[in-house]
């Protein structure tokens, strides 16, 4: 099943093994909005195609996009910086019952304690390390009362390609991934995104982490001689210079992180 529009995106019901295609078009700058009413043919500068895929037996949505520069006109040196994938205003039931966990390394100013209450992060923006080199790019949301968790991340095939962020509007939080690109867009050039993956698991956060690990194993397979204990290893990266007493000053911050066994 494919749905394609001529003016505005067209969204349909997502079905197992169904790919829904939505195409949005923008007019070139300077083309009068009344051109269609006068019977004139319209020229579009860009064509954005978004792909959504669900899989049977999996609580998972994959989505990706491609951008085609159809007509350059006078602006022949447009530059593209990124595809932006967002899960806007996301919550699982009552936001007051939800918590946010963002695995990975942090700077002191963007530290999100595992299980931080949703309501504490609804103001402002928090940006994280680039992924998958310096950070994981994974953002998770949980509702322990309803026993459900959600995770959002990108599958880049191992390429260092995106930054994840939390945006709060004062009431709700948006998960955002900037899938980085660096292209000039002459006519007939198409740029492709990586794939965003959104998973929802009733088994909680461990099941979401399992989905992330599955993606990593498929795209960055573990060397076959890797010791078995590695899968349970906890790796901490510490910046003692940010604390007055160096590592001693940092130690209380480490010990209050749940599940680190220190």
Image: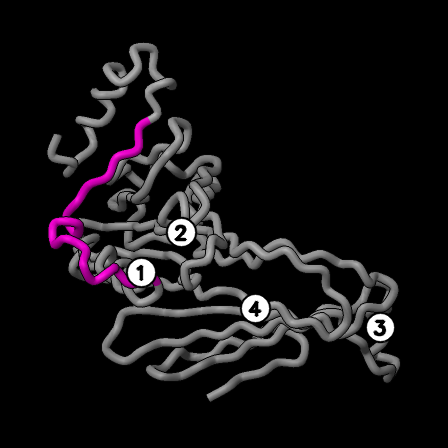
* 228 falls in the magenta region: yes
Query: Which residue reaches farthest front?
Result: 225
- Mark seen at residue 132: 2
User: Between residues 248 and 64, which one lies in front from this camera angle?
Assistant: 248
User: Between residues 50 and 78, which one lies in front from this camera angle?
Assistant: 78
Label count reads 4
The residues bearing labels 4 and 3 have C-alpha atoms spaced at a distance of 32 Å
Q: Which residues are magenta?
A: 220-238
Examine the rendering and report whether any part of residue 122 can be seen.
yes
- Mark seen at residue 216: 1
Q: Is residue 191 left or right of residue 142?
A: right
- Mark seen at residue 233: none
Query: Which residue reaches farthest top?
Result: 244
Q: Which residue has dot 4 on it?
A: 192
The residues bearing labels 2 and 3 have C-alpha atoms spaced at a distance of 46 Å
Disc 3 or 1, which lies upstream in sequence? Answer: 3
Mark 2 or mark 3: which is in front?
A: 2
Mark 3: secondary structure: loop
Question: Looking at the image, do the residues carrying marks 3 and 1 touch, with CB atoms under 8 Å apart?
Answer: no
Q: Is residue 207 left or right of residue 78?
A: left
| Image position, residue 132 (x, y; %) | 40, 51
Q: Is residue 169 left or right of residue 9?
A: left
| Image position, residue 111 (x, y; %) | 35, 32
Residue in the image at 35% along x and 25% along y: 239
Badge 1 density bin: few <14, some 14–19, many ≥20, Cα 10 Å: some
In the displayed structure, 179 sits above or below 23; it is above
């Amino acid at each position: 099943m494919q749905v394609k529009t001529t003016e505005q995106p067209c969204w349909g019901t997502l079905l197992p093994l169904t790919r829904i295609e939505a195409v949005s078009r923008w007019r070139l700058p300077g083309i009068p909005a009344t051109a269609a009413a006068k019977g004139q043919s319209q020229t579009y500068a860009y064509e954005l195609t978004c792909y959504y895929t669900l899989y049977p037996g999996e609580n998972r949505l994959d989505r990706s996009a491609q951008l085609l520069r159809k007509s350059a006109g006078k602006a022949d040196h447009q530059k593209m910086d990124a595809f932006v994938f967002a899960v806007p205003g996301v919550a699982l039931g009552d936001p007051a019952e939800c918590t946010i966990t963002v695995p990975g390394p942090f700077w002191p100013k963007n530290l999100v304690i595992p299980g931080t209450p949703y309501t504490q992060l609804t103001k402002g923006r928090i940006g994280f390390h680039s992924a998958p080199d310096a950070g994981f790019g994974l953002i998770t949301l949980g509702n322990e009362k309803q026993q459900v968790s959600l995770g959002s991340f990108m599958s880049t095939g191992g390429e260092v390609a995106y930054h994840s962020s939390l945006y709060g509007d004062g009431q709700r939080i948006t998960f955002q991934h900037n899938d980085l690109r660096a292209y000039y867009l002459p006519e007939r050039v198409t740029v492709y995104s990586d794939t965003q993956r959104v998973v929802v698991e009733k088994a909680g956060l461990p099941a979401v982490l399992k989905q992330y690990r599955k993606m990593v194993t498929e795209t960055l397979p573990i060397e076959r001689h890797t010791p078995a204990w590695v899968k349970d290893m906890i790796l901490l990266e510490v910046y003692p210079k940010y604390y007055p007493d160096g590592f001693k000053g940092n130690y209380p911050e480490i010990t209050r992180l749940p599940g680190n066994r220190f």
